[in-house]
Image (cartoon, rainbow, N blue to C red):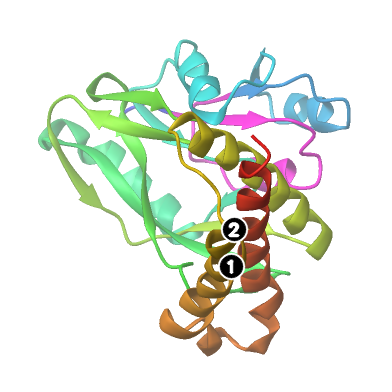
Amino acid sequence: MKSKISVLTITKNNEETIGKTLLSLKGLTSEIVVVDSNSNDRTANILKKYKAKVIVKEFDNIGRQRMYGMKYVTGDWVLILDSDEVVSEKLKKEIKKVSRQARKSNLVAYEIPFQNHFLGRPVKYGGENYKMLRLFRKKALEIRPLELHNYFVVKKGKTSKLKGEILHYSYRSIGQIYRKFTDYAKRDARIRAQKGEKSSLKKIFLYPIHMFWARFIEDKGYKDGLFRIPLDLGFAYMEFLTYIILATL
């Protein structure tokens, strides 16, 4: 018997990407639950077009937004999907298979591989090749917030891995990337300050160089091509800004 699949996502002024995200869910889900943080662009109209169940909540952090949205999810299975992510056709078929065989299995959660894109082109090296737990039985897992993201706690049952990918369009333009990294640096600096960490000249000037070296050289980011250099410089910039801000806190 096929189980009911719900998708949970969060939005705030995501008119650029959310339509593509929701279109990729066609024929897969029984409901789309969206926690929206008072978007003032075309996001609301796009959500209405795809008949999403929209709950408005001022943004706190990703984990708390998702925890709030889970209260409104009614499906047996939940797929967590961000507003700049797309379900590939291969992944869609796998999820359908999981839902059909659910009653015959003790598997309750699945990690899904990501295919990240930089300026519309796929990147596979330099820290961009990873899996995340994103599909799970609603009753078998808890979402717990962190300052930047969240983590999942599996209460019972076993986990496994799927092969189909989530296509992630997080790095869409140079301006968008650096705005994102600036926001992350501000929040990361606050976290480090709360933990009692101090900045230093070594951290400000050497850590960014190491970040670029680690991503582009050690983790073989160069295999993707020279076009990704601005991305790895962006991570170095985020490291630099984090410790500059930390020095002021």
Q: What residue type is labelled 2?
A: Glu
Q: What residue type is labelled 1?
A: Pro
Image coords of residue 35 (percent x, y): 62, 21
Q: Residue 51 location, x and y as percent? A: 68, 24
Q: In which quarter of the image is the N terminus?
A: top left
Magenta stretch: give its range.
6-33
* Percent position of residue 15, x then y: 81, 40
Task: Identify the residue at horizontal 59%, vertical 58% (top origin).
Answer: 239
Name which residue lies at 52% across and 18% down: 69
State the residue lying farthest toward the right.
41
Q: In this view, does 131 lie to the left or right of 1?
A: right
State whether residue 193 is above or below residue 120: above
The residue depicted at 65 percent of the width and 78 percent of the height is 228
Q: In this view, does 81 lie to the left or right of 231?
A: left
In the rendering, which numbered label is found on residue 239?
Answer: 2
Secondary element under disc 2, as helix, strand or loop, is: helix
211 relative to 69, above or below: below
Q: In which quarter of the image is residue 156?
A: top left
Contact? badges 2 and 1 (CB < 8 Å): yes
Q: In this view, does 93 lie to the left or right of 191?
A: left
Q: In this view, does 4 lie to the left or right of 17?
A: left
Residue tagged by mark 1?
208
Quarter of the image with the C terminus is top right
